[in-house]
Image (cartoon, rainbow, N blue to C red):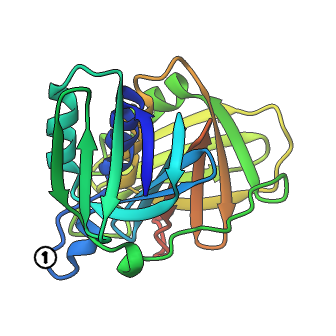
Amino acid sequence: MHIKVNRQNFLSAIRTVEKSVKENKIKPILSCIYAKVKENKIYFTGTNLDTTIKTSIDVDEVIREGEIAFSYSIIDEYLKEIKDEFVVLRVENGNILFIETEDSTTEYDVHSAEDYPNTFENIVLNDSNFKFEMPSQELVNIFEKVLFSADTPDNIAINCIRIESILKHLHFVSTNTYRLTFLKKNIDKDIPDFSVSVPADTISSIIKIIKGLDNEVIKVYKEEAHLYFQYKDTMIITKLIELRFPNY
C-alpha cells in the first residue's frame, strides 16, 4: 500500500470506525482498524463482531493498492499533532507503515490483514430490505430519550432498544423491568411490519457518530439477523438481539 491522502479526512474516518473497536487480548487483530486501498478510495472497517462500522474516503494519489490492520490510537495521536494537509502512507514488508510529511518520516508496526475477519464485503441494500429513514438529529433525539431505560447490561434481552413498525407507526421502546420508555412516531411510507432489538451499546455508538452531522438522512435496512444504518459513505451494522423482548 502506498498512497497520498488528505490528513484530516483520514483522521475523521478512523475516528468514525474506531467507535466499534474494543480491546481484545484473545484476538488482538480485533483491536485494530482495517484499511484497504482499491482504485481511488480507501475503505475502513472497525468491528467487535457484534457491531461493525465501515466508511470510505477518496485518495488523492494511489501508487500501490493494498490492505493493512493497525492500532488506531497511536496513528490518531500522531496525525492530530501534525499540520500538513496531505500525508503519504507507505507499507513495506507487509508490517511496517511509514507516514511521510513534508519534513519527516515516522514508522509504525502494523498487522497483516490476512487474519482480519471478512465483514460484510458483499452486502446489497435495496428497496427489498429497506425499513425506514429519518434525519440524523431526530434519530439522535429519539435514541437519547429511549436509551434511558436500557440500563441492564446483565440482562441481554432488555439491554436494547426495541424498534417496531406497526400500521405506519414506528415504536421505540426500552425497559429495565422497573420503568419503561415508549416513543411513537408516524411514518409516511408503507413498509411491512417488523420488530427488532438493537443492543444498547450499538445505540450509544450510533449517537456518538451521527450527533455531529448536518442533519443527514439515515437510512435503515434489515438483512437476516443484522440492522444497517447508512448515510453517505458510512455504514453501521449491528447484530440483533434474538431473545424475546417483554410484552408492553
Residue beneath label 1, please? 25
Which one is nearer the viewer's eye here, 176 or 208? 208
Left/right of residue 89 with respect to residue 53 in the rendered view: left
Residue 128 position (above or below residue 131): below
* One can see residue 59 in this view: no
Where is residue 171? Give x, y as percent.
Answer: 59, 44
Q: Quadrant of residue 216?
A: top right
Left/right of residue 24 with respect to residue 172 in the rendered view: left
- Total marks drawn? 1
Identified by mark 1, the residue type is Lys
Residue appearing at x 22%, y 80% in the figure = 27
Which one is nearer the viewer's eye here, 78 or 232? 78
* One can see residue 112 in this view: yes
Residue appearing at x 21%, y 58% in the figure = 71
Where is residue 247? Give x, y as percent.
Answer: 51, 63
Q: Quadrant of residue 223?
A: bottom right
Residue 220 position (above or below residue 59): below
Which one is nearer the viewer's eye here, 17 or 146? 17
Residue appearing at x 45%, y 65% in the figure = 246
Residue 54 position (above or below residue 115): above
Left/right of residue 19 with respect to residue 165 in the rendered view: left
Which one is nearer the viewer's eye here, 187 or 31? 31
Count residues near mark 1 (Cα–Cα under 10 Å), then give few for <14, some for 14-19, many for 20+: few
Residue appearing at x 68%, y 65% in the figure = 123
Residue 170 position (above or below residue 50): above
